[in-house]
Amino acid sequence: MPGLIRVKITSWTASFRYPTFQSGYQPTLPVPPLSTIQGILSAAKGDIVYFNELPFFGYIFRSRGKGIDLERIYALGKKETDVMRREILFNNELYLYLPQKWEEYFKKPRFQLLLGRSSDLASVEEVKEITLEKRKGAPVGGTVVPVNSGLPGIIHALPVEFDYSAVPRRVKAARPFVILPFPKNPAQRKRQAYSGELKYDPELDIGVWIYEGVYG
């Protein structure tokens, strides 16, 4: 895969909306959905990005822990406030695998990068050219994969892209995905090993699910 870069993005906190929870306790998904990646790419470029503009992309996300915070919220149209328990991921790393032309956008992002909500500020720590190996039976994690991958895990219907031509934004596309946290022990690595051939990042010791044409 010629002309490949890996962008390392870090943040103190991250929170990704769990699709089946709308109020009360707010858990977080363990990894960002594709729509979050769309938001990061759009912020870096300074314009709305849709995945059909990219020949390929992939990502790996991992965090060092999580906790619960108390958050005061204001109900729409009401003066009263409420307190919500929100789950937050701490000390996070997001690795983006992108065509080389994206190097210029991430070396000087146009807008602030976020890993979730507006308070989850992120920064670019490194942009480098890398070469991914091909490996069969590599563990996969820190990402979401299509349900036809054959990998076991929690399945959720997640937004792929948002349409920003209207206000408020609306979901342009949603698909079912298998959610795969970054494997943290040998048992999990074995369970999340992909039987086919994948691109493999030897520095992170993880397979990289490459999306081509969004759903590849």
Image (spheres, helix red, strand yellow):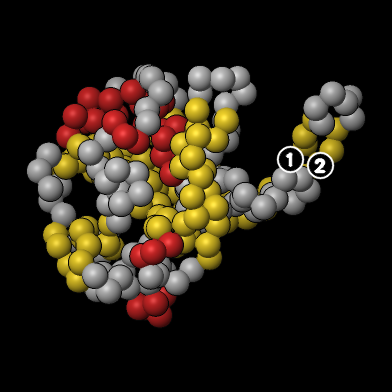
> Dot 1 lies on which element?
strand
Q: Which mark is residue 200?
A: none
Which residue shows up at 56% across the image and 46% down it?
16
Report the front residue among 150 and 60. Answer: 150
Q: Which residue is mark 2?
A: 83
- Closer to the N terminus: mark 1 or mark 2? 1
Measure how far apart labels 1 and 2 are at the Cα level: 5 Å
Q: Amino acid at mark 1?
A: Glu
Q: Amino acid at mark 2?
A: Val
Residue 58 appears in the figure: no
Is the residue under label 2 in contact with that under label 1 (CB below 8 Å)?
A: yes
Which residue shows up at 25% across the image and 42% down it?
56
Q: Is residue 40 left or right of residue 30?
A: left
Give residue 55's position: percent from left, percent from top: 23, 38
Q: Is residue 12 left or right of residue 146?
A: right
Q: Which residue is mark 1?
A: 71
**Above or below 165: residue 66:** below
**Above or below 109: residue 192:** below
Quarter of image, res 199: bottom left
Report the front residue among 17 and 156. Answer: 156
